Amino acid sequence: MKKIFRKIIFSAVAIYFTSLWNKGFVIEADWLVYLKAALVIAAIYYLIVPISKLILLPLNIITLGLVSVVFYALALYFFLNKFSLIEIKPWEFSGLSLWGIIIIPAKVSQLANIFLSAFSISTIINLLERMV
């Protein structure tokens, strides 16, 4: 029970941080929408991801994990769009200059933003799990 509750909290934090930096990842500023989205993402990472790792193991070995990345991104996009909780749309990254490192401005398509959002959410969840 504690693990499920932690996944829900981590999912909500990941949604919030992703919406802060990714302007194409739009979520309504309502706590109920955040809770529903966190429940959906927690269910994906608690139920679907372990089952998919087992089923997709031969393909992951052949493609060096590429099938798994595509599956997670599409599952996230499908479930969040099905429940109309989060809108992922194209956006224009204005660039960044931080400690002498310059990242140039770029246009991010909707498909690329789906993968960026899925990568961001899964990275934040995994970092929070490793910290606890």
Image (tube, rainbow, N blue to C red):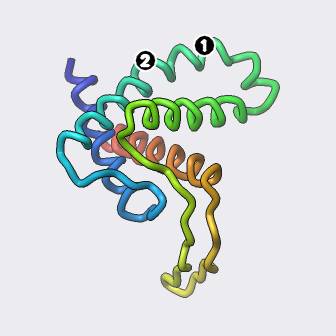
Amino acid on which disc 1 is placed: Leu
Q: Crowding at label 2, few (<14), some or many (≥20) Cα neighbours within 10 Å?
A: few
Residue under the point 35% across and 47% down: 14
Q: Earlier in the sequence, mark 1 or mark 2?
A: 2
- Secondary structure beneath dot 2 equals helix
**114 above or below 11?**
below
> Could you say where residue 60 lies in the image, as x and y percent from the top left?
72, 25
CA distance separating discs 1 and 2: 12 Å
- Secondary structure beneath dot 1 equals helix
Q: Single out the mark in the foreground, 1 or 2.
A: 2
> Could you say where residue 70 lies in the image, as x and y percent from the top left?
66, 35
| In this rendering, position of residue 27 left or right of residue 48 | left
Residue under the point 31% across and 53% down: 16
Residue under the point 51% across and 23% down: 49
> Could you say where residue 65 lies in the image, as x and y percent from the top left?
70, 32
Q: Quadrant of residue 8?
A: top left
How many labels, in total?
A: 2
Residue under the point 76% across and 21% down: 59
Amino acid on which disc 2 is placed: Leu
> Could you say where residue 24 lies in the image, as x and y percent from the top left?
48, 60
Q: Looking at the rendered structure, which numbered label has been put on residue 54?
A: 1
Q: Looking at the rendered structure, which numbered label has been put on residue 77?
A: none
**117 above or below 108?**
above
Q: Looking at the rendered structure, which numbered label has been put on residue 47?
A: 2
Q: Residue furthest bottom?
A: 100
